[in-house]
Amino acid sequence: MSKLAHDISHLGNVLRARAVSQIREHSTQFANIPEFYRDQLSHVIIQKWDPENAIATAKDLFGKTKLRYAAIDGTERTDPTFDLMIFYGGAYAALGSIDLEIREPIQSVTIDSQLTTGGVGVAACIPVYISEIPEIELARLKFSHEKEDQKETRTINDIFDETVIDNSQIANDIMLLAEIRLGETLAKTKHYDVIILDRYLAGTHANLLAKTVSFNSYEQESSLIGLETEFGEVTKADLWFNRYRPFNKRIDIPPPRGEYLSHRIFFELEQREELSLSQLIEEFGLSDSPRVIGRVKKAIELLEKNDVVTVIGEGKETEIILSDTYKQSFARILAAKETIVSKLFDLEDKDTNPLRIDVKGEKRWLTTVDLALLSLFSFNSLVHEAQTRPFLLIGITKDTYSRDFRNQFLNFLNAFPESPVKIDMKTKMALPQTDRGLLQAVSHVVLDELHPPWATQEYDTAFRTMGPKKGELWPTMSGSHQNIILSERLFVKSFIQLREGKTNPELRSTVLMTDRVVLEKDLKHAIRLPNLIHHYRGISEHVRPLVMPANAKDNPIQNLIMRILTLLDAPSIPEAMGHNKPLFVADKVCKWFGEVFGGIVSSTKQWMETHKDIRSYAFHLTSFREKRTDFEQTRKG
């Protein structure tokens, strides 16, 4: 036997031995789980749910018990065809009804028929020449050939190569925008009481904010600046100061602290057009120390520098006046978003590329930053609809490697004097390292004590980025990355497990992560926490996250959501057991549409190859790999 054959044969034995060793080592982490569950974790897990209370909550929220729902999923694909890259992104909603007064899921839940012909969805199909992709990725960044700047030359070449080889991000951005757009459209019909997205709401929001954070680069990275609307031209300040919507004073978002202070001042001025410095400090509940006043003044200077406000006077009686141009800033953003997004998903317009917009007589490509901004503005609109109507906007995540429940929230409860959770950190460190892994292991080990459907208590998604500050007394918090704490009171999250086998309790569904938009009604049920202190750039600021009670009676909205999700489970479908049947259906329809579109692309390519006017041109644009495949298939017959 040759050495190569011996190595291949031996490789299988090595892999099996090492895999078994790794699994056995991992299983030793389970030894401490029973004690950890009884002493600590059981205090934050809810098992008892009240169907009658869910009916009462539905009547209070919606005035009815028969609810309409929409479950939205998306799909995307990128197809190279000659010198074109064809980007496809779409979203589909499975629609139906839930009657909470009928106890049996089979009778209580209906899914609308005619899924592929009478359903609701949006899609965009966009062909782009490979040579033009960097304009979308690089975002109008102009490189002068006259400059002898080798660093810039290398940068544009590197980006060109990368975007040609890996350009799936564009299709993914279109898919995300399609999902949010569909949700926003359905929400504005006011026909739906529950909208479910197959994604992590707080994570999506944070990612969109991160992609659009470079204020000083907007002029190079965004094609939206200068776009004419009926309310005037879009400016850089319009894009920046509308990012942190929705504005909801009753819920107190965005909070008047840190990175959000100038945005909150802008939103307050939109309501009254003129405020004094002393009024802002008083209404925000800030101290009148010189440092705090200096922070507020700095936020006002950012607004003044961008001509958003005019400042008159000095000291505490300084008057801040919103400029006439920015009284319609939000209207401009909404108009620009609506014009572009409606065009992007308009399949009736066959003659124009929806990724190109006309700005001051110049054709510009929408950039990936623009797509993120449009998604963010649409997402903010969707959240605002959920808070004001209201309806339940829920995100469900199947696979997650988050650690904030384990590492941030449990540590917070451990430090909170009134919490019954007191964690032995040494024991916790020996347990599985991810939230889902920890909770899945607990459910597997304490079968007799923990029975689905169960959920962890809901907590603010701001805990993803905060925790007790080491070495300092409670209630001092710190940000987990660059000492920044994300905006609180926007979303609360929990982990859930919905199903176990009727004859075999060891057969249990996957632990899922859910999050939802905070509603005003949540404020009266939330646990009263002390004002948490965050030392940010030399100033003590207050952070006010929400932590909901760990029982169904005192958190009626979570009780209602668990009732809805339990009814929407699909125990008869093995791969969807413990998940969500409408999302499962939406996913299958999305995949069907994606496959159909793939067939359309393939047939379009064949049509081009045989068209008498363009076939010779198409042949020369075909890559070597495509030509070789065609020849091989022809040879094989």
Image (tube, rainbow, N blue to C red):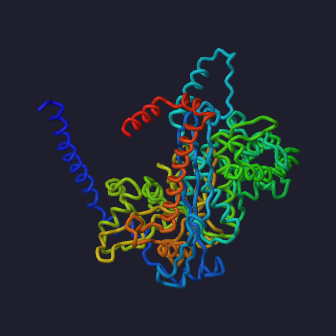
Of 207 and 105, nearer the camera is: 105
Q: Residue at x 78, y 52 (%)?
A: 335
The mark total stands at 0
- Pinpoint residue 561: horizontal percent, then vertical percent: 53, 72
Task: Indicate the quadrant containing the C terminus: top left, top right, bottom left or bottom right.
Answer: top left
Of 8 and 472, nearer the camera is: 8
* Side (left or right) of 543 relative to 582: right
* Side (left or right) of 401 relative to 278: left
- Pinpoint residue 90: horizontal percent, then vertical percent: 59, 53
Q: Is residue 157 visible?
A: yes
Q: Is residue 133 shown above or below 318?
A: above
Q: Is residue 476 visible?
A: no
Of 438 and 421, nearer the camera is: 438
- Pinpoint residue 40: horizontal percent, then vertical percent: 38, 66
Of 260 and 626, nearer the camera is: 626
Q: Is residue 142 shown above or below 235?
A: above
Q: Is residue 466 shown above or below 189?
A: above
Q: Residue furthest left?
A: 1
Q: Is residue 354 shown above or below 46?
A: above
Q: Residue at x 56, y 81 (%)?
A: 99
Task: Indicate the quadrant containing the N terminus: top left, top right, bottom left or bottom right.
Answer: top left
Q: Residue at x 29, y 70 (%)?
A: 506
- Pinpoint residue 600: horizontal percent, then vertical percent: 55, 49
The image quadrant that residue 187 belongs to is: bottom right
